[in-house]
Amino acid sequence: MKNTFYLNISTADSLGIGLFKYSISPQERFIITNYALVKLLGFKYKKELHQTQLGQYFLSPEEKERFFRVLRQEGRVRFFETQFRNTQGKHVWVAVTASLVISKNKHEYIEGIIENISSHKDMEEKLAYERDFLQGLLDNIPDAIYFKDCDHRIIKVNKFYAQGVGLGSTETAGKTDFDFFPYEQAKRMYEDDKYVLTKGKPIVGKVERTTLPNGTWNQVITTKIPMYDRKGKIIGTMGITRDMTAYAHLESERRTMLINALKVLGKALEMRDPYTFSHTRHVADIAEAIGQRLNWDENRLLEIRLAAELHDLGKIGVPLDILNKPGTLTPLEYNLIQEHVTMCYDLIKDIVFPFPLAEIIYQHHEHLDGTGYPRKLKGDQLCLESRILAVSDALEAMTHRRPYREGLGIDRALHELRTASGSKYDPQIVDIVNQLVEENHGRVFWAGIS
């Protein structure tokens, strides 16, 4: 037995596991230890460790008492997790597995191993934090969020979903839509899940009418996406269902969400550079008026207004002393200002809109003849929305005071637009602007529109 213990001591050194034999009586002290334990407890030499007692390393007196109580009652402890304080004052999570041994002469010993599990504990805490954070985030979202496996059984739901079906979050696990909804409705949900699982494609923004467990109806919009494991295999679905009953029209609600998001971005710009914010609001008024003259519907007017509101957002990344420089810009400064187009595009290109918002903004400084920037696009490469935005931007900029010059006035601005009509600017849009000014008796037509 003794030879085996020494063999384990040698092996444990290479594994980094602390191995020990500890005398309880007649005197408390370490008898045998390996270098892994010496290092774990903050010593350089075994003889230093052998002059100390096991109990002094327990960070918590209560944990120390519980360890020795269990050891005496059961004769052993298995993977007893606790914190030690080593000689350097460092707190270390350890797992102790030990047995109480009584020799022939009635002396008591403890033989066992001590493993440093700090990294495991750190990982556990990190995972617990991430899990709690995710659950807290899910529970604070006022939409029903749910996860299902490949058998269409619920794995996890948020608080909103659980409240909707009248159960606790954990009570829903293992159930299906057939447990909560009428058969025909649950069947449609089942078919949607099956489509996502077999095709690997999401179902986005499906509007449907559902019956709740209490018998009432509501209108919801649902998105379902496939979930994948690390190897890219589909392992289930995730769904988000929003109650839309309070809204009479889906398009109106979508408009509200987009405008609210716009206000947040606009406020950020306004706080940094009030001039640019005011400019973008005026450009939006001009562009919207042009769109109305073209008989655009509400959705397309929203599209051009959003593009105008956001078109200078990239100037957040341009130093204010350059934006507001009263004198002539150097070539380097001018190039830096031109970068605001690409900056804005990069900011919003990954945001999903029902229209090509990022591309419209990306083109608003391009010219019909290819002399614009940043990509030198020309002619039919430019969408109509960007052409409107280009004219609106130029018109507003010329008629209002800039840091480096006074406003040119409406007559001069119109002259400049007509001069560049067909080369830089779309002739149709320039003509519409002229008409709008004439109808407003030669004055700016966008003041007070919004």
Image: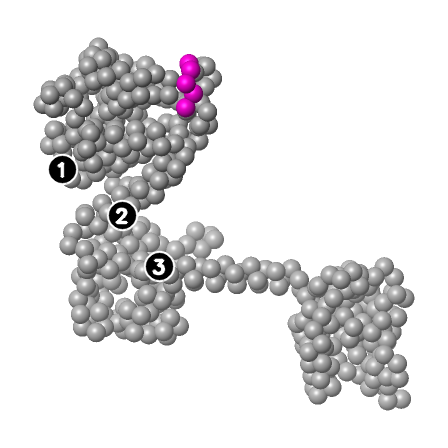
Residue 386 located left or right of residue 21: left
Q: Nearer the viewer, residue 439 or 303?
A: 439
The residue that appears at 28% across and 41% down in the rendered structure is 353
Residue 297: image tag: 1
Q: Which mark is residue 141?
A: 3
Q: Amino acid at mark 2?
A: Met
Which residue: 31% across, 60% down?
143
Q: Position of residue 435 (x, y in %)?
A: 11, 21
* Residue 38 in the image, given as x and y percentages of width and height: 82, 63
**Residue at 47% across / 59% down in the picture?**
133
For label 2, the SS is: helix
Judged by depth in the image, the label closer to the viewer, 1 or 2, is 2
Residues rendered magenta in the picture: 324-328
The residue lying toward the viewer, choosing from 295 and 316, is 316
C-beta proximity under 8 Å, tags 1 and 2 = no
Residue 344: where, in percent of width, then height?
37, 32
The residue located at (39%, 29%) in the rendering is: 315
State the quadrant of the N terminus: bottom right
Give coordinates of residue 448: x percent, y percent.
Answer: 19, 33
Q: Secondary structure at mark 3?
A: loop
Q: Which residue is mark 2?
A: 257
